[in-house]
Amino acid sequence: MKHTQFNAAAYEHETPVRFFGSETEFSMPLPVDTDPEECTASLVDILPDQEILASGNYGGVYMAYDGGITYLDHGNVVECSTPECASAMELALHERVAEARAATIAQYVRDKYDMASTAYKRSGWAEITDPKNPAALLFEELSTGHHENYHAPGLTMHGSSFPRERRLALQAILATRKTWTGTGMVTQTAYLTTQKPAAIDYIDGNSQTSHGNKIPWRANGSALEIRDGEGNMSEWVIRHKYALTSLALRMLEHDCFPEGLYLENPNHAVASIAINPSASVQLANGRSMPAIDHQYALYDSAVRQLGDTLPDEEINAFVAFESLWKDYKEIDFDKMEVTPISDRVDWAAKLDHMLLRNLEPTNIHGGNFGALSHDLEWEDVSTKGPAREWYRKYGNEQITSSDVLIARTKPPQTRAARRVSLVLAKRNEDSASMTVTMKGWSSLEIDGVTYPLGDPS
């Protein structure tokens, strides 16, 4: 690699490659009269033997050869964490591995309980009532997690107490990012471009969901954990979301974030984008600009200031985003004409998918059960799910099923990921039962013994 140091000083004075990870919650139907723990606690009996290295430190947890972790979280939600990855492309691959594992668990539930069960990579539900009986609640907004982790030791030194300028910068980066990272959702009255229109309060951490307060980010060891993300199905979005967010974070690390790009109110910005992705946002300086132009200005500023020192992946992501930015100008959301970007952007792909199935643009809302059905099935993570089939046809995806199969049993090439795999494999030879705890990306604890992993490199 270009750099050998990956500490706070390196990121403040240079531009080393970034390391990434993610945590995704997959929801799936389970028997109503069955304890959810009973359905999925025996994960080691569900997944292929060659994947499993150890059970974890509490029920239903296992660690895989690729360094990933899977466990049951809050009933019918299975959470999969990727290992730390040395590129956004590698991260996208291991998110696909997580999808494959979730699909395997859903298949197990189908076979064992003879019931329909599908794993969904979904970030939220709208509150939907029966049009004929408004008191009957059909769906209630419940935000589930999709968290992004960025190795950024200089940004995590202050914990959750960020300096004001960095806090304002992060709010701006994340809020307008919804223009192209939103996953789309049918609500009671309309189609929104994000599944988290109100789940995150970027200013004070309070939210309007029954799931509890949702903070937009937090320090997680040496990683900055971004908590407003959505479970994207588009490989293009996953790769470029990580690379471009990393690029924008470098302006915080180098104290060169453009003051003119702070937002007047990030919550209002997200609400506007949810209703109309072409909306303008108010800047703190009193001006306004289209939200997608705000995103372009952020990345353009980072490239202009940091230039040739940036990793190739981030430069390439900016070039790809510039093409999307130009295509974005061709959409007409009022008429629901979004084909110029539906080969890459999830909310647009889902919308086009519904329109191609003869749903009328004016009838995409919660009163139309056909629209609800298309919406809810989109994030089916099986290889035959609508989103996966769409992107195979239109999206020019680079990750193949063979790539996913190989990656399920092979760790990424970062030092920490390799050491997790090697240490667990050695201990697995000596003991059939281990209590394992991951402590960020820096150490692994097995039966009370701590094994330092070092920073990813």
Image (cartoon, grey):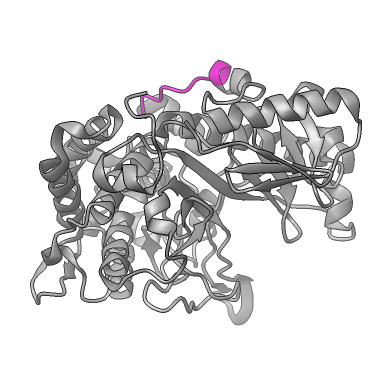
Q: Is residue 448 left or right of residue 408?
A: right
For the magenta stretch, what is the residue range?
395-403
How many numbered discs?
A: 0
Query: Residue 360 in the image: x percent, y percent?
Result: 36, 54
* 259 within the magenta span: no
Q: Is residue 2 left or right of residue 91?
A: left
Q: Is residue 253 above or below residue 259?
A: above
Taking depth in this image into account, of 361 and 142 the one nearest to the observer is 142
Residue 322 visible at all: yes
Identify the residue shown where x is 36% and y is 44%.
Answer: 241
Query: Residue 320 in the image: x percent, y percent?
Result: 23, 33
Taking depth in this image into account, of 431 and 77 the one nearest to the observer is 431
Could you say which quadrant of the image residue 2 lies in?
Answer: top left
- Judged from this view, the residue extending furthest toward the left is 287
Identify the residue shown where x is 47% and y is 49%.
Answer: 148
Query: Residue 250 in the image: x percent, y percent?
Result: 27, 48
Q: Main secondary structure of the magenta part?
A: loop
Residue 246 visible at all: no
Q: Is residue 358 above or below residue 428?
A: below
Could you say which quadrant of the image residue 310 lies in?
Answer: top left
Could you say which quadrant of the image residue 361 lies in?
Answer: bottom left
Query: Residue 375 in the image: x percent, y percent?
Result: 50, 52
Taking depth in this image into account, of 250 and 175 the one nearest to the observer is 250
Q: Is residue 107 above or below residue 197?
A: above
Identify the residue shown where x is 21% and y is 53%.
Answer: 295
* 397 within the magenta span: yes
Q: Is residue 39 left or right of residue 167?
A: right
- Judged from this view, the residue extending furthest toward the bottom is 135
Which quadrant, please, contains the N terminus? top left
